[in-house]
Image: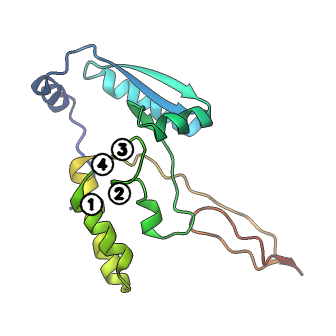
Amino acid sequence: PIGVHEYDVEKAKTLLQESGVPEGTKIELQTGDNRTNIDICEIVQNMLSQIGLDVEIQILEAAAQNQLNAEGKLQMAILSTTSATGDADQALLIFPSTYTGAIMVRDDEIDSILDRGRSAFSNDERKEAYGEIQQINYDMIYTLPVAFPDTMYGIRNDVEGFIFDPGSRPDLSGVTFK
């Protein structure tokens, strides 16, 4: 079942030793110039230092980070994405084998499940398929979701037709004032 990964410094040290990663290994952690992502990088840097890894945070301009991501050249990165449509398929665009970015999963099972989810007409079938992807991501830790900032809007009583979009982008096309 999907849940929270246990924070266990000693287990992490053991796993690193078993995998042959020497203490003091240098890692580049890249992110864009975004305060939330930089804060997350500093937390990750601190946590990885506790298991003996030397993490250098690199703050990149968005175009440079996007280019490195597209080329698959980010060693470790804090990236942000959203599903502007609210559709799970859009949120999972980073998983297909055709994706050219930092994750590059290349997993035939995931491709098959994504195809099944995309072609399903039933919401229950789509939910089941995308739940399987979430479970695989949890088990394999291809990505580690760390935060989801809340977006809040306040509107006056004389505003009508405001639609809050699941991708955190409001639809103002139908807004009118009384």
> Where is residue 25 drawn, in percent x and y?
28, 16
Residue carrying label 2? 96
First-in-chain label (1 vs 4):
4
| SS at circle 2 | loop
Tag 3 residue? 103
Q: In this view, does 149 lie to the left or right of 54?
A: right
Q: Is mark 4 on a helix, strand or loop?
A: loop
**Total marks drawn?**
4
Residue linked to disc 1: 110
Question: Tag 4: Cα neighbours inside 10 Å, few (<14), some, or many (≥20)?
Answer: some
Q: What element carries label 3?
A: loop
Amino acid on which disc 1 is placed: Ile
Query: Mark 2–mark 1 contact, CB under 8 Å?
Result: yes
At 51% from the left edge and 24% from the top edge, which residue is drawn? Answer: 58
Which quadrant of the view contains residue 9? top left
Residue type of the residue flagged with mark 2: Pro
The residues tagged by marks 2 and 1 sit, at their Cα atoms, a distance apart of 7 Å
Contact (CB < 8 A) between labels 1 and 4? yes
Identify the residue at image location x=26%, y=18%.
52
- Give amino acid for label 3: Ile
